[in-house]
Image (tube, rainbow, N blue to C red):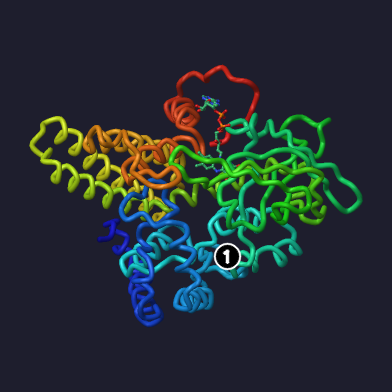
Amino acid sequence: MRVELGLDRDPTLADLRSELRNWITDNAPPGLADLLDWRSGVDLPGSVASRVSEEERACAIRDPRYRQWEQRCLDARLVCPAWPTEHGGRGWHAPEMTVLDEEFYRAGVPRVDRVQGESMVGPSIILHGTDDQRVRFLPPIRSGDHRYCQGFSEPAAGSDLASARTRGVVDGDEVIITGQKVWTSRFATANMIFVLCRTNPQESKHRGLSYVIVPFTPGENGIEVRPIRQMTGAAEFAEVFFDATRARLADVIGGLGRGWQVVQSTLAFERAAAGRASTMLIQARRRELRDLIDLARRKGLTGDPLVRQDLAWAATQVLLLSTTWSRTVAEIAAGREPGRQQTAWKLMWSEYHLRLGEIALRIAGPGALARPAGVGYPTDDWQDAYLVAHSGTVYAGTSEVHRNIIGEGVLGLPREPRPAAAIRS
Ligand SMILES: Cc1cc2nc3c(=O)[nH]c(=O)nc-3n(C[C@H](O)[C@H](O)[C@H](O)COP(=O)(O)OP(=O)(O)OC[C@H]3O[C@@H](n4cnc5c(N)ncnc54)[C@H](O)[C@@H]3O)c2cc1C
């Protein structure tokens, strides 16, 4: 099933769709779609339907068929396709990316996605980096040789990122970094990190920051990583400690003391990427709802008026998510900026998922309170959805921060008193 966006009324997008459909047919190695349930997307928190573990995914991407597919996607510029053509992409925007996602989803084949390298640090280097930095850092992101994690948040600097305290001291042609980051996702697969640090403590809060690319070498160069066990039992993020970690001055992006501008771009790219992932997100939510209705059926609860009401609410929300996203993409396709819709969208899907988790546990019944048997800290799919859904209301700007943005920026309500700090949204 694909999301009906009406994009195909645009003949260029309709042509792109058939071009991609034919390309997939001609290039997907036989058996690729059966290697893994690529549609379940481990990158979508709470994607319940047929959860795919990191181990299963790691095994699938070592398979020669995946490797062949990856190379073909690289050759066809379908890796980092939103990057400008001179950097190996196709210069695509949300409508083209949506068609791409829909066609790959329809065929059940994987998008070769370089995640934070592709969607956050790469575009920031394109915008703020020097030619030398673009040459050194962009190709290894596309090839998959550099895999990034994000070193922004600190124990006392999350929403208020400009309060970052990690120090960067310039020493000759190096920057020596000391401090602590937290909630660093993808630490387990990363070999590079982009770090926000304070290189000039005398300057005002926003002006003394720098954005540095650092090889991520846990156990070496003063970098220590301590995984954080989440309530789902998984450890998808970590605390990262820097103790006199040496980075190259040449790897400061945007210039010394100009890190805040680069951070703002990175966060804007993060929000845009979250929007682009929305086709997958909607599919995941549809699939999850179907599974929940099946669960209610198996438990003989579909005649219960309260359960029916909850399921009807969820079905309405999924429809609203789909139409809201359709409207956003249609506006982008028509050349208009989506503006604050992205904020409303983030709030909408994350708060929906939080409530869906509660509904799921009510339907699952008292058994949902007990963890399944097994070593470690296992959870079943619905427990996992409920627990993971909380994180969606925190990352990429918390719900409270987004509500403030809507209240003040869209509805024109009086500003909430706050410390003089720029807020991550
Ligand atoms: C799953 C997940 C993955 C993450 N991955 C990364 C990563 O890879 N790298 C990274 O650097 N960070 C990452 N983060 C961290 C994330 O960006 C922060 O958690 C987020 O910015 C909030 O910061 P905080 O946790 O310090 O909460 P705080 O900013 O301390 O907020 C605490 C509470 O106060 C509220 N609050 C704060 N400021 C305001 C305000 N101005 N108005 C109203 N309410 C406010 C918040 O809404 C929240 O309820 C991740 C987080 C999660 C959940």
- For ligand 1, tell me if the residue under mark 1 lies within 8 Å: no
Name the spot of residue 63 as percent of width and height, x first.
47, 74
Residue at horizontal 34 percent and vertical 79 percent from the top: 25
Q: In the depicted view, which residue is nearer to us: 273 or 14?
A: 273
Q: Quadrant of residue 309?
A: top left
Horizontal relation, residue 279 to residue 182: left or right = left
Q: Residues within 10 Å of mark 1 (few under 14, many from 20)?
A: some
Q: Quadrant of residue 208?
A: top right
Name the spot of residue 375 as percent of width and height, x first.
43, 47
Horizontal relation, residue 239 to residue 328: left or right = right
Q: In the depicted view, which residue is nearer to us: 302 or 280?
A: 302
Name the spot of residue 357 as percent of width and height, x first.
32, 37
Q: Quadrant of residue 35?
A: bottom left
Residue at horizontal 72 percent and vertical 43 percent from the top: 259
Q: Quadrant of ligand 1?
A: top right
The quarter in which the N terminus is drawn is bottom left
Q: Amino acid at mark 1?
A: Pro
Horizontal relation, residue 270 to residue 221: left or right = left
Residue at horizontal 49 percent and vertical 70 percent from the top: 78
Q: Of helix, strand and loop, which one carries label 1?
A: loop
Q: In the depicted view, which residue is nearer to us: 388 or 210?
A: 388
Horizontal relation, residue 232 to residue 169: left or right = left
Q: How many marks?
A: 1
Return the residue found at the far right.
172
Residue designated by label 1: 84
Q: Is residue 116 above or below residue 181?
A: below
Return the residue found at the far left.
303
